[in-house]
Amino acid sequence: MKKSTASRTIFMIINYILLIATSLICLLPFVNLLAISFSDSAASTAGKVTFWPVNFTTKSYEFIITGGAFFPALWVSVKRVLLGVFVNMVLMVLTAYPLSKTKAQLRGRNIYMIFFVITMLIGGGLIPTYLLVVRLGLLDSIWALILPGALPVYNMIILMNFMRTLPVELEEAAMIDGAGPFTVLVRVILPLLTPALATVGLFCVVGHWNEWFSGLIYMQKTIHYPLQTYLQSLLKNMDVIMRLATTDYIKLLSLMSARTGRAAQLFLAALPMMLVYPYLQKYFTTGLVLGSVKG
């Protein structure tokens, strides 16, 4: 017994060491990024910044926020996430539910699955997609950022496979009570999908928040840029900003460097996802249907 207890103690110590090391590997780069963003240009360029700001300054954040389009771009990204995730979730649920049935229950199920898998593996291409968006009149519209990826097939397959693990007896009991397919989906299936919906929902949120390229090609006016597109183009156009800047703004630019500016951009871009993730993480490994069928 003592030998077993000692072995377990050693095992737990090693586990704690490995978990702490892994956590530090994930956390310290963000701490370094934050420290660089709050340091002055000379210290960051000289490589003196580690995990604490050197010559603390907020000039990089002032540069990004006072650029004129930060808050409009933030609002565009918020609208995109809210509308995009809602559209994604509705289409994924309505597609995954019938595809979770067997071939006997849904005629031609394999044909539909092949169709969706092909669209996941083979894209239509950038130019045809752009021409389709133009023909639909979606340029400079929030829907140009949402509709081309309205149904994430990979996430839909995850949701479909989760539905297939649910006990069939739950649906059969609801149908015996007179419920139709839509009622079964809304009243029986959806409440049991909380872990899966939280998981694919987080994937959709991160995808919409981090995606910047569609804003660059579909938005003709910079006022319609989502936040990631705005931040990505901000320092690339430094020469234009310098030519058009006022005297006060040029003084602000002189107190920061490209490295501190990029660090501030990356931290601002990652901050919302770091705040959202802890609220959804608890659903990832939760099995809400465990023991739901008795007897």
Image: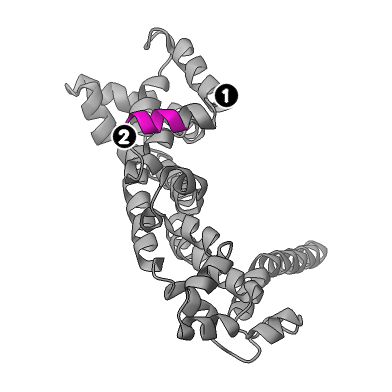
- Please tell me which residue lies in front, 240 or 73: 240
Q: Which mark is residue 137?
A: 2
- Name the side, left or right, on which 79 lies relative to 284: left
Three-letter amino acid code at the position of disc 1: Ile
Identify the mark nearer the N-term, 1 or 2: 1
Where does residue 122 sit, x and y in percent of width and height?
Answer: 57, 24
Image quadrant where one finds the C terminus: top left
- 25 relative to 248, above or below: above
Please report the residue visible at 52 percent of the width from the left and 25 percent of the height from the top.
124
- Please tell me which residue lies in front, 105 or 262: 262
Q: Which mark is residue 122?
A: 1
Image quadrant where one finds the N terminus: bottom right
Name the residue furthest right. 3
| Res 164 → quadrant | top left
What is the total number of numbered labels drawn onto the structure image? 2
Q: Which mark is residue 47?
A: none
- 160 relative to 257, above or below: above
Q: Which residues are magenta?
A: 130-136
Three-letter amino acid code at the position of disc 2: Gly
Q: Nearer the viewer, mark 1 or mark 2?
A: 2
Where does residue 43 sit, x and y in percent of width and height?
Answer: 70, 86
Q: Quick one: label 2, few (<14), some, or many (20+) residues within 10 Å?
A: few
Name the residue furthest front. 243
Q: Is residue 45 magenta?
A: no
SS label for mark 2: loop
SS label for mark 1: loop
| Res 48 → quadrant | bottom right
Where does residue 141 sit, x and y in percent of width and height?
Answer: 32, 44
Q: CA–CA distance between discs 1 and 2?
A: 25 Å
- Please tell me which residue lies in front, 179 or 139: 139
Where does residue 91 sit, x and y in percent of width and height?
Answer: 35, 32
